[in-house]
Amino acid sequence: MIFATGGMDSLPSVLPTALRELIRYVRPSWLRRWVRDGYAWVQPRLSPVARAALPPHLTAEYLEKTRGAIDFNRPGIPIIASLPSVHIAETYGKAHHGRAGTVAAITEWAQHHDIPLVDLKAAVAEQILSGYGNRDGIHWNFEAHQAVAELMLKALAEAGVPNEKSRG
């Protein structure tokens, strides 16, 4: 089981997630478009002072609820998890001050359960922060994906998953 979560949790959000998700239900459609456009204008400008989309302790709590449910149904299944990536996205005002708290919460949770971690920052920072990722500043290029895959395979091996080469 790979928990590749927490990245969006750590990004700044000027609106609570529950409220932001309700934008799609605004009627009539012209008003919904106006609200979306307003949110798109405000988000990058207020991101440097906005809270993380999800408080770090809740990220860890949700991971634990999921891990507990999986362990109940499939005791001993190998599990790995990832730490949030990094970005330079204008849509988030290039802000990512929620990452450190989310990293700390996930790391503490993983250590408590002996779950190997993949630090996505270690895999993608060179590509993303130097501008070689996707032009949006948040999505990865091929080299970053390859680096993530290598770290994932290493963590899976650490968790006890055999590394079988593909046959071809």
Image (tube, rainbow, N blue to C red):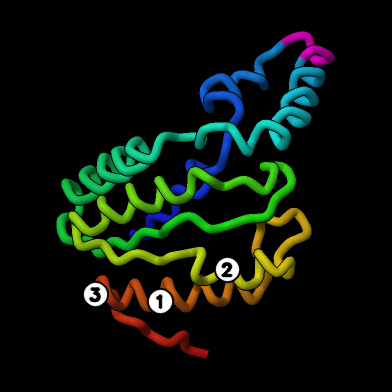
Residue at x 78% of width, y 59% of height: 135
Q: Which of the marked residues, 1 or 3, is nearer the chain's N terminus?
A: 1
> Label 3 amino acid?
Gly
Identified at 65% across, 71% down, the residue is 127
- How many other residues sit within 10 Å of disc 2, few (<14), some (14-19) or many (≥20)? many
Q: Residue furthest bottom?
A: 168
Instruction: Please rate how many residues cluster around mark 3, counting C-alpha atoms within 10 Å: few if below 14, some from 14 to 19, many from 20.
Output: few
Residue 161 vs residue 152, the one in the foreground: 152
Closer to the camera in the image, 101 or 154: 101
Q: Main secondary structure of the magenta part?
A: helix
| Residue 153 image label | 1
Which quadrant holds residue 164?
Answer: bottom left
How packed mark 1 is, by other alpha carbons closer than 10 Å (few <14, some 14-19, many 20 or more), is some
* Element type at mark 2: helix
Residues under numbered marks 2 and 1 in contact, where contact means CB atoms less than 8 Å apart: no
Q: Which mark is residue 124?
A: 2
25 sits left or right of 108 in the view: right
Tell me, for residue 38, which label it has, or none: none
Picture quadrant of residue 14: top right
Find the magenta span and give its range: 27-31
Secondary element under disc 3, as helix, strand or loop, is loop
Q: Is residue 96 above or below residue 53?
A: below
Question: How far apart are labels 2 and 3 at the CA level?
Answer: 25 Å
Instruction: Indicate left or right for 16 with 152 as reference.
Output: right
Helix, strand or loop under label 1: helix
Q: Residue extending furthest top?
A: 28
Query: Please, what is the three-letter code of the amino acid marked with disc 1?
Result: Leu
Q: Residue furthest right?
A: 30
The three-letter amino acid code for the residue at tag 2 is Val
Where residue 129 appears, x then y in whole percent?
66, 65
The image's mark for residue 160 is: 3
